[in-house]
Amino acid sequence: MSDKKIPAKMAGPSRRAFMAGTAAMTASLFLPKGLRAADFPTAEVNTTGLAVTDDTVTIGILHSVTGTMAISETGSVQAEKLAIDQINAQGGILGRKIEYIQEDGASDWPTFAEKARKLLVNDKVASVMGCWTSASRKAVLPVFEQHNGFLYYPTFYEGLEQSPNVIYTGQEATQQIIAGLDWVSETKGAKTFYLLGSDYIWPRTSNKIARKHIENFLEGSKVVGEEYYPLGHTQFNSVINKIRLRKPDVIYAIVVGGSNVAFYKQLKAAGIDPTGESPLVLTISVTEDEIRGIGGENIEGTYACMKYFQSLQNDNNLEFVKAFKEMWGEDIVIGDVTQAAYLGPWLWKAAVEKAGSFDINKVREAQIGVELDSAPEGYVKVHENHHLWSKTRVGRAQADGQYEVVFETAELVEPDPFPEGYQ
Amino acid sequence: MSIASNRLFTRQDIIGFAVLAAVVFIVLPLTLDSFRLNLFGKYLTYAFVAVGLVLCWGAGGILSLGQGVFFGLGGYCMAMFLKLEASTPENTAIQSTPGIPDFMDWNQLTALPWWWEPFNTLTFALLAVVAVPVMFAFIIGVAMFRRRVGGVYFAIITQAFAAILTILIIGQQGFTGGVNGITDLRTLQGWDIRTDAAKETLYYVNGVLLFSCLLIAQFVRKSKLGRLLIAMRDQEDRVRFSGYDVASFKIFIFCLGAAFAGIGGAMFTLQVGFMSPTLVGIVPSIEMVIFCAVGGRLSIIGAVYGALLVNWAKTSLSESFPELWLFGLGGLFIAVVMLFPNGLAGLYADHVAPRIDRLLSRKSADVGPADDTARAAAE
């Protein structure tokens, strides 16, 4: 894509996404200059009665801003608002400014379903950026399918799902797990793994995939233990003792939320310092956001497998981090999911412009194959299974709460929500 | 006690029932679009629990902080039937074992557990909606009341049951759907419950069931049992010394409350389209007590309004102030408890009812002395 030809009027990271959209449009029959609303009469771009006027289009933001999940979901809300602001600063979508209606899911799954229905039925929003936990997504899914809404879901999750009404901007389980296990096996020579997780669908499915990969694809490797603890569990001493007895090469930890604080502190107190790498601690559940709670000094040396780290050194990301801090404050940290949430409005914009319409069915069709080379994580592409092609990266936690990227896959990893051989 | 309160319906009761019926069956359906009506249908499912709590807590003095358990059990029984119907081999063809619910497949189950089998039949499921919560309540009731556990201890123990059931459901996710709950429910005997028309029908079914429960509750309140309950609440030992088997009465009323909650849970599942452990635990159980307190714990009609008002406030506050609404709701609760200790019903009984009575008749015989019994009867 030719970056240099278009006047650099638009600020920051937005410019690149703007180009992606424009380029997509050049490819279609529309004129590249036709970005004024007048070029897209409302009657033509909105044939299904969505909330589109001559100069605005309304979308929904549906996350928990109260309750236990608020601490995790706030970053996503912030990222989505930043993206919307940036898109509006460039003139919006098809000449229309994006307005949003924010609803609070309140960390409560029936509330998510209620609010989703409100956004789709009452407010007729053109798309929704939202949800975080799998449970909330499962709760809203029938609503989106019944009312033909369009949801951009940001969280890395267990896979096993592919709804025509959802674009999954986070990574499904295989994208997050396999490359990380290969890396630890090849570069660290790890042979024995102790799997550990919070007790719900995501850690269990992820560990199932990890176990199959370790047993079937990594020669001579084996799982020496697998355990689950309820959400919010804070007593990890017994499992830490078992770990000391079995002496695995790797502790593969998928502990979530507040339990993380207890887990890493107790690990260190028990003399298993992650910096010693014996055993090495590898996680897929701790982003920069969680480290704020755990404390950098407690988790230093742990490896995390993600697709995005705030410390990524590329131009897109430097601009993204700068804009994010300008909007939300210097102290803020940006985790994997926050970045994935930021992609939602941009992917939707690109699809709408490619389709030349806000109609959900046309956007859905146009969305497949959309490319963004403006993403902070680097180039991404939408797969026909509604997930993103993206790279897998391994970072090493630093005492300052950031990750140092130590590995990234050479190519984009194909999303595979129903992995064969891993069921 | 005045003779009037011995009749099943006093004039005030008739006014209360008639106004509520008008609100539920005429005003709400006429003024609300189908989305809002469905929301009110959801709120009304909580009213079942609140009515049960009026009997247990307001009349019987048994404060249960675990009504979510019964609500959840009823809801899960319904959800299991609907889930099995949705999990036909055609719908689940991508699974390793087609024909079983999706979450079982994710958890490597290869066959339907034996205790799921009976839920293939609707009759069994409908019976279970009432029977399972009642059985549970009976076991808890026998264990507690026979040992004369009451008051705060009973409240704490019911709360523990709510916590235990939540942990059990989340932990046994292969059998229960875990923290996600049982989702993606589609049809009831081939009838698509997700359409607007179906939602409207379910709303009316819900309303009729609620009124049936209200009538049963009214009957209990006005029967000898109702008066014994109030006597037990105020002077348990005297009732016992008079030769009554206090524990049996308590067990009965606790089971009745559980049955109401179970029906509410089943209607919740049908109208919302899923069931999850977030509706079983401590927080929803306490919320249900709040509905009852706001409405007035002595009045069955008040409890319905309480459930409607609190949930409506929750929805509208959270729509208008997504980041601050919890403070508003908290303020509302504090205001109600400080200013109207008997809730909306107390407000009505103190200020509105006497005026209506004066308007309607010159003989003010219906308004008895202002003790709790008469006041409750007046509603």
Image (cartoon, coloured by chain):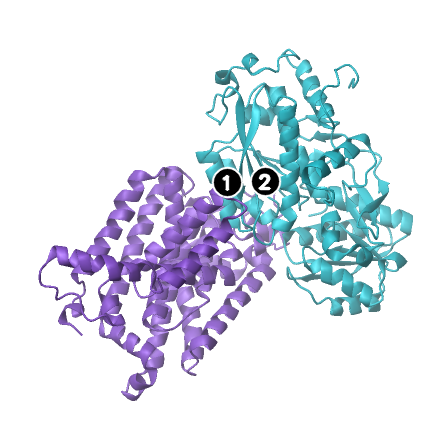
On the image, the x and y values in percent for residue A292 come to 74, 52
Q: Residue at x 54, y 13 (%)?
A: A38
Please say if the residues under marks 1 and 2 sit with CB atoms less than 8 Å apart. yes
Question: According to the image, label 1 marks what residue?
Answer: A116
In the image, residue A311 above or below residue B44 = above
Numbered disc total: 2
On the image, the x and y values in percent for residue B261 come to 39, 61
B322 with respect to B64 (left or right): right
- Discs 1 and 2 carry the same chain letter: yes
Q: Residue at x 54, y 48 (%)?
A: B99
B203 with respect to A342 (left or right): left
Q: Residues within 10 Å of mark 2 (few under 14, many from 20)?
A: many
A282 with respect to A92 (left or right): right
Q: Which chain is purple?
A: B
Q: Which chain is cyan?
A: A
Q: Compare residues B120 and B1 and report the one nearer the observer.
A: B1
Question: According to the image, label 2 marks what residue?
Answer: A130
Q: What's the chain of the residue with tag 1?
A: A
Q: What's the chain of the residue with tag 2?
A: A
B98 with respect to A392 (left or right): left
The residue type indicated by label 1 comes to Ala
* Mark linked to residue B307: none
Q: Secondary structure at mark 2?
A: strand
Q: Residues within 10 Å of mark 1 (few under 14, many from 20)?
A: many
Viewer can see residue B299: yes
On the image, the x and y values in percent for residue A407 come to 86, 42
**Residue B173's quadrant in the figure?**
bottom right
The residue type indicated by label 2 comes to Gly
In the image, residue B154 above or below residue A187 = below
The numbered mark, 1 or 2, whose residue comes first in the sequence reads: 1
On the image, the x and y values in percent for residue A60 come to 54, 35
Q: Secondary structure at mark 1?
A: helix
